[in-house]
Amino acid sequence: MELRVYSAAEVHAALPWAPLAAALEAAFVRGDTHAPLRHAHALGAVGEAGTSPGSLLLMPAWSAEAIGVKTVTVMPGAAALGAGTVQASYLLLDRATGVARALIDGEALTLRRTAATSALAARRLARPDAQRLLLVGAGRLAPWMVRAHLALQPGLRQVQVWARDAPAAAALVRLLRSESVDAEVAADLQAAVQRADIVGCATTSRTPLVQGAWLRAGTHLDLVGGFRPDMREADDVAMAHSRVVVDTYAGALAEAGDLVQPIAAGVFDAGHVVAELAELLRGQRPGRLAPDDITCFKSVGAAVEDLAAALLVATGP
């Protein structure tokens, strides 16, 4: 079996939003993928004194179809060497023999599957008449979040972007407008949240950005950026007043600061989470119960998503 290498451009081309969402939904509904929590390792010291030595993250998964593992490196000194701080690769292996089938650009895979998973959850959790999307953050993931939501929820008509880095927000809006998206920069975060039907957050913030007092009845909150216990995108009031669905119980309740912190403080307990995504998609547990409900999807990333997307890249729909 010859190893096939897929570039970022090939990955994006192989993962149109609708087929990707269908593949992700099928994987969650089947529930036959084994996906342990990510393994994080601090690396030994390299380079100048005082420089962080970097981290290695491993995300394995396997099913009856294939085996896969994503490797992610976070190297603070990489920029000085002309490389990105974060690098990711995905290795797909034959299930029967363990022979390597594909080496896939890990960043492109992650961008696509993360955005598609959020949009897939929003189809079940957001109000069907949602028209206004606010994206908080303007980093690498941000445009893909907007594209996924617009593709999977045709009712969305308007997009606002807010970011602490105002030039980055303006650049993202220009990019979206070049793709014929009705987009504008949100000058005031509170006003933008109060106006939005869906509020998506894709940041690395360690302090809450979205305040629960700002959320209108019926709003859907999508929290993607915080993947460590010390990271927050929404305050305790927002989380306490929401019907919260997570990508997986194991991951979110161990790693998501938006849940870990209020649970530790006694604001609510783990039972406040009403479902994980697989249960929602199977119809085992409800998400939104009424038009006025505030709903929240909190994700930290799950290896089941990587494997489903990688199989789609390597074998097609």
Image: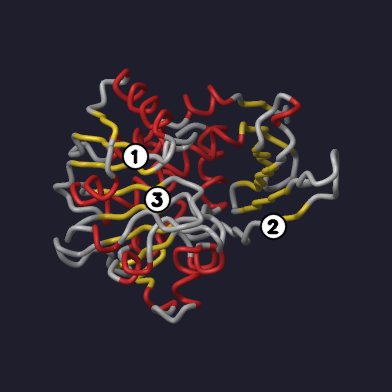
Neighbours of disc 1 within 10 Å: few (<14), some (14-19), many (20+): many
**Residue drawn at point x = 35 percent, y = 67 percent:** 239
When asked about the image quadrant of residue 289, the answer is bottom left
The picture places residue 234, in percent across and down from the top left corner, at 38, 59
Q: Nearer the viewer, mark 1 or mark 3?
A: 1
Mark 3 or 2, nearer chain start: 3
Instruction: Report the front residue among 3 and 219.
Output: 219
For mark 2, what is the residue?
39
Quick one: SS at disc 1? Answer: strand
**Residue drawn at point x = 23 percent, y = 58 percent:** 215
- Where, quadrant-wise, is the C terminus in this rendering? top left
Q: Is residue 306 above or below residue 89?
A: below
When asked about the image quadrant of residue 174, the answer is top left
Q: Nearer the viewer, mark 1 or mark 2?
A: 1
For mark 1, what is the residue?
162
The color scheme shown is secondary structure
Quick one: SS at disc 3? Answer: helix
Instruction: Report the front residue among 208 and 10.
Output: 208
Horizontal arrangement in the rendering, residue 176 relative to residue 54 (left or right): left
Q: Is residue 243 above or below residue 87?
A: below
The picture places residue 22, in percent across and down from the top left corner, at 38, 43
Mark 1 or 2, nearer chain start: 2
**Residue drawn at point x = 53 percent, y = 28 percent:** 11
For mark 3, what is the residue?
25
| C-alpha separation, residue under disc 1 versus residue under disc 3 | 30 Å
Neighbours of disc 2 within 10 Å: few (<14), some (14-19), many (20+): few
| C-alpha separation, residue under disc 3 versus residue under disc 2 | 25 Å
Q: Nearer the viewer, mark 3 or mark 2?
A: 2
Residue 54: mark in rendering: none
| C-alpha separation, residue under disc 1 versus residue under disc 2 | 32 Å
Going by the numbered disc 2, the residue's amino acid type is His
Mark 1 or 3, nearer chain start: 3
